C-alpha cells in the first residue's frame, strides 16, 4: 500500500479513505479525528468526533454541548478500529489533551503530529515519538532562526521587570488555551506566589485545566477599575485585549507578549510590545529536526508553517519531503 492510499490531502483536510474519516478537518465533515482543542484544528459541526477526553471537554467549553452529533473519547494509547483503519492517539505535548493521530493499516504506519513541542510543559503530557513510515508534521517555526530560549529564563525576565517597575502593571498577552495556563504554572515555578490577575476570556479554560488537575494557584479576575490595585501585579489577557480600551484600567502598563514569534523583533515593535517573551507551544527548528531524526520516517509530509525550509533540511538528510499546503491552519501570532 502506498502512504497516499491511507491518508491524502483534500480541501477539507487529511482524509483516510480506509476509515472514511478526516484528521483535523478545516470544515464540517461526517467523521473527524481531532488532535487538540485550538480552533484552527477543532471546529464545530462535524457528524462524529474522536478525540481525547480533555479535547472533547475543551470543545464543549468553546462550542457548547452540541458541537458534534456524536463524540467518542479515546485515552492515550488506546487502539480503536475506525472503519477499515486503526487509530491511536499519543501525546503531542502541545496543550492539555493534545495528541498525535497514529493511523495504521496493512503494515503501514502514518503519524499526524498535529501541533507539538518537545520541551517540558507542566500542564500537559509530554510528546511521545512514534517510529513511522510517514511523519506528517507542522512547521510553524520551520526556519533555523527560530531557536527558543529556556522558558525559565524568559519567566525570570518578566519577574525581574516586575521588581524593577513596582509601580507599573505587567500586562501579558497570552493565547487563552494552553499558553495562559502554562505561563501561570511557569510563574509559580519561578517563585511568584501572589495572585495573578486574568482577563474574563481566560476564566472558563483556566477552570477546565483546574478540573483536570492542573493547579494554577490563586487567580483573580481583572475587574477592578482602581489603577492602584494593579501596581506591581501581573495580568494575563488575550493579545487583542492588550491593545484594547480594556487595558486603560492599568497603571502605566508594561505591554508583554508570550509567543515564539517574539524572536522576531519587528513583530514585537509592530505590536507595541515593550517586553517580548519568547515562550512557545510549538517546536522550534532544533526540536522539529531532532523529532524527524528520532522517528526516522520513510517520508515527511508538512501540513502548514515554514514548509520549504523544513522540507529542504529533510531532503538534505535523506528523507523525501513534500509540503501539503493545507489551507486553514493558523501559523501567525495567535498560534505561537
Image (cartoon, rainbow, N blue to C red):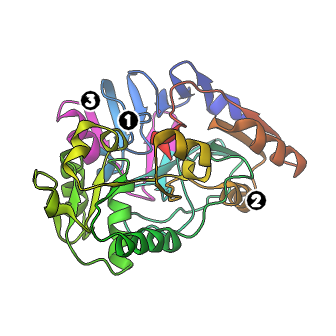
Label 3 vs 2, first from the N-terminus = 3
Dot 3: element = strand
Point 38% across, 21% down: residue = 28
Circle 3: is it few (<14), some (14-19), or many (20+) Cα within 10 Å? many
Image coords of residue 19 (percent x, y): 50, 31
Query: Is 319 in front, or is 188?
Result: 188
Can residue 222 be seen at all in this image of the molecule?
yes
Q: Which residues are magenta?
A: 57-86
Q: Quadrant of the N terminus?
A: top right
Residue 114 appears in the rendering: no
Per the model, the C-alpha gap separating discs 2 and 1 is 29 Å
Q: In the image, what residue occupies the spot 53% across and 62% down?
A: 127
| Residue wearing tag 3 | 68
> Who is closer to the viewer here, 54 or 170?
170
**In the figure, 231 relative to 259: above or below?**
below
In space, the residues marked 3 and 1 are separated at their CA atoms by 14 Å
Q: Which labelled disc corresponds to residue 293?
A: 2
Q: Which residue is mark 1?
A: 39
Q: In this rendering, would 61 be left or right of 1?
A: left
The number of numbered badges drawn on the structure is: 3
Q: Nearer the viewer, mark 2 or mark 1?
A: 1
Q: Nearer the viewer, residue 179 or 104?
A: 179
Residue 53 point in image, percent of width and height: 30, 51
Q: Which comes sooner in the sequence, label 2 or label 1?
A: 1
Determine the residue positioned at 29% across, 62% down: 168
Label 3 or label 1, whichever comes before in sequence order: 1
Amino acid at each position: 500500500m502506498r502512504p497516499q492510499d491511507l491518508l491524502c490531502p483534500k480541501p477539507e483536510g487529511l482524509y483516510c479513505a480506509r476509515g472514511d474519516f478526516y484528521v483535523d478537518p478545516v470544515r464540517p465533515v461526517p467523521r473527524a479525528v481531532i488532535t487538540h482543542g485550538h480552533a484552527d484544528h477543532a471546529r464545530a459541526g462535524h457528524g462524529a468526533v474522536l478525540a481525547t477526553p480533555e479535547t472533547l471537554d475543551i470543545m464543549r467549553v468553546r462550542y457548547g454541548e452540541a458541537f458534534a452529533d456524536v463524540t467518542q473519547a479515546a485515552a492515550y494509547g488506546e487502539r480503536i478500529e475506525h472503519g477499515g483503519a486503526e487509530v491511536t492517539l499519543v501525546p503531542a505535548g502541545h496543550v492539555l489533551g493534545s495528541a498525535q493521530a497514529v493511523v495504521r493499516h496493512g503494515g503501514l504506519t502514518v503519524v499526524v503530529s498535529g501541533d507539538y513541542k518537545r520541551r517540558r510543559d507542566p500542564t500537559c503530557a509530554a510528546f511521545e515519538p512514534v517510529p513511522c513510515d510517514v511523519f506528517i508534521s507542522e512547521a510553524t517555526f520551520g526556519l533555523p532562526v527560530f531557536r527558543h530560549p529556556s522558558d525559565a529564563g524568559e519567566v525570570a525576565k518578566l519577574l525581574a521587570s516586575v521588581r524593577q517597575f513596582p509601580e507599573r502593571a505587567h500586562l501579558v498577552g497570552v493565547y487563552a488555551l494552553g499558553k495562559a495556563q502554562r505561563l501561570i504554572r511557569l510563574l509559580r515555578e519561578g517563585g511568584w506566589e501572589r495572585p495573578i490577575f486574568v482577563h474574563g476570556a481566560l476564566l472558563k479554560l483556566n477552570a477546565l485545566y483546574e478540573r483536570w488537575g492542573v493547579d494554577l494557584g490563586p487567580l483573580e479576575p481583572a475587574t477592578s477599575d482602581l489603577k492602584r490595585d494593579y501596581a506591581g501585579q501581573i495580568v494575563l489577557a488575550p493579545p487583542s485585549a492588550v491593545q484594547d480600551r480594556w487595558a486603560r484600567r492599568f497603571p502605566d502598563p508594561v505591554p508583554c507578549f508570550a509567543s515564539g514569534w517574539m524572536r522576531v523583533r519587528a513583530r514585537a515593535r509592530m505590536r507595541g510590545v515593550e517586553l517580548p517573551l519568547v515562550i512557545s507551544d510549538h517546536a522550534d527548528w532544533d526540536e522539529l529536526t531532532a523529532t524527524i531524526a528520532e522517528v526516522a520516517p520513510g517520508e515527511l509530509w508538512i501540513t502548514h508553517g515554514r514548509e520549504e525550509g523544513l522540507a529542504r533540511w529533510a531532503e538534505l538528510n535523506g528523507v523525501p519531503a513534500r509540503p501539503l499546503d493545507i489551507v486553514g491552519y493558523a501559523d501567525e501570532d495567535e498560534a505561537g
